[in-house]
Image: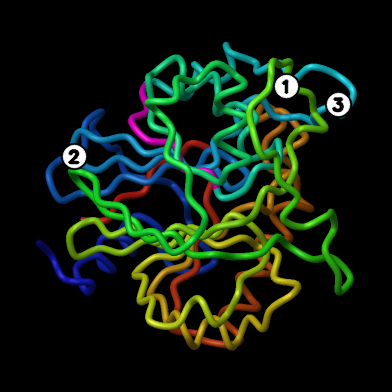
Amino acid sequence: MKTIEAILITLCLVFGSWPVDTRAQAIPKTSSQGTLALKWLGNAGWEIQVGQTIILIDPFLTRGEANPNAEWKTDEAAVLRIIKRADYIFAGHSHADHIADVPFIAKKFSSKVIGSRTTTNIALTGGVDKSQIVTISGGEKLDFKEFSVEVIESRHGWHNGRPVRKENEEIPSPWRGPIRGSDFVDGGSYLYYFTFGQQRVLHQSTGNVIEAKLKGLRPDVVLMNSGHQGYDLSSVLKILNPKIIIVHHFDRWQLPFADGLPDAALGRGRRFARDINAIDKNIKVVIPKYFETYTLD
């Protein structure tokens, strides 16, 4: 397996120099042994393929706000245009723009669902079989056939110095549906620290972290939320010391994908990239495009 220097060379060939050229190299439908293929699904959503295994994180393809007073309806056609298979689905927290499509995807593909008690109770209410459920609460180390993952307790993003919604509100048990927009509460927030052989990828679902929980993590790549109120970005970058950061959650997830990335959204991503490089110019920062695939060899 190649070293991180070789990984960086591969990424440079794909991404170009900063400002980032995000035209991706073609990826075969099934990635080769030892190769990671990462595809941005918008918002904090990712598809990661390693060998024959497909991992989804925070997949939300329906787009749009969830009406708190109405039953949630996944746009099944929109999901299936992008998602062809899913072995595992990881949820960073339980807001609609992170998990509203999870019950449909899990039922369609018999995927394992890994998430908080709130996430898994919403999945059960949505008809996912209990044999597919893995409930986490932070601190777990999970081993699967082609990868392992450490669950890191985190916090939801802040705005103007305080949480934007009630933090850690939970749904303690499944119910006899329907699932309404108001059911997608925080449920607790988590980072996922994946190990794929010698390659380590950290996914940040929200715009916040608990710095003390990051000590000892050494990710090669961080899939990082562009919002960073509530923590010291300089301190977090020093702790993690990543080689590559791929920015996400800078787009307008309320808008359809057909609208593309608005200039204001791209501006948010670029400002965050500049903030990172002002702290550490050696970090490679990537601003992705919808549904393009990036590889780590």
Residue at figure coordinates x 72%, y 55% from the top left: 168
Tell me how the rendering is colored.
rainbow
What is the three-letter code of the residue carrying label 3?
A: Asn
Left or right: residue 175 compared with residue 223:
right
Mark 2 residue type: Gly
Which residue is found at the position 85% from the left and 19% from the top? 70
- Decide which of tag 1 and tag 3 comes sooner along the chain: 3
Q: Quadrant of residue 141?
A: bottom left
Q: Which residue is mark 1?
A: 179
Judging depth in this view, the residue of 45 and 141 nearest the camera is 141
Please provide the residue range marked out in magenta: 85-91
Residue closest to the far front: 173
Task: Measure how far apart labels 3 and 2 are at the Cα level.
Answer: 39 Å
Residue 218, given in percent of the width and then of the height, sits at 35, 76
Measure the C-alpha gap from mark 1 to mark 3. 11 Å
Q: Position of residue 145 (x, y in %)?
A: 18, 43
Q: What number is the disc on residue 51?
A: 2
